[in-house]
Image (cartoon, grey):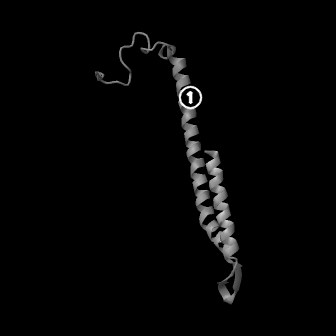
Amino acid sequence: MQFLKTLFWVVVAALAVIFAYRNWVPAEIELWGGLEADVKLPVLLLIAFLLGYVPLFLVHKASRWRQKRKLDNVQRALEEARAQLALQDPATFSADADGPAGATASPLSSGPQPTFL
């Protein structure tokens, strides 16, 4: 699979180089105040791509960072709650497959459990 990813990016890079070589012509941009700028077409396309890509990439990274922080906080709180529960009632965390000794139903259940055939 790594070979296919590498091959894909090599093909994309080769196509970009061929495009840049064949379209290396100046593009005239009219700026404010009567200023004009001559920029090569591939450079202009790269700048336009980066102007669209970088802000969205930064927003994506910031949202992933926030979500990771929230998830870390929830995991930490869950570990603390488990530790406190283990200190309060160590019989709850027995190694039995049926659950705590002497317990007939889960504390979260509120009625009869369904049976599956």
On the rendered structure, is 29 left or right of 90?
A: right
Residue of label 1? 79
Question: From this viewpoint, is residue 43 visible?
Answer: no
Reply above or below: 97 against 79.
above
Q: Position of residue 117 (x, y in %)?
A: 28, 21
Q: Nearer the viewer, residue 9 or 35?
A: 9
Q: Nearer the viewer, residue 63 or 17?
A: 17
- Which quarter of the figure is the N terminus placed in? top right
Reply above or below: 78 against 102.
below
Q: Position of residue 24 (x, y in %)?
A: 70, 77
* Residue type (three-letter) at the residue carrying disc 1: Glu
Question: From this viewpoint, is residue 56 visible?
Answer: yes
Instruction: Name the residue located 61 percent from the left edge and 49 percent from the top edge.
Output: 4
Residue 23 found in image quarter: bottom right
Q: Position of residue 80 (x, y in %)?
A: 56, 28
On the rendered structure, is 88 left or right of 112?
A: right
Reply above or below: 58 against 49.
above
**Neighbour class for label 1 at 10 Å: few (<14), some, many (≥20)?**
few
On the rendered structure, is 92 left or right of 67?
A: left
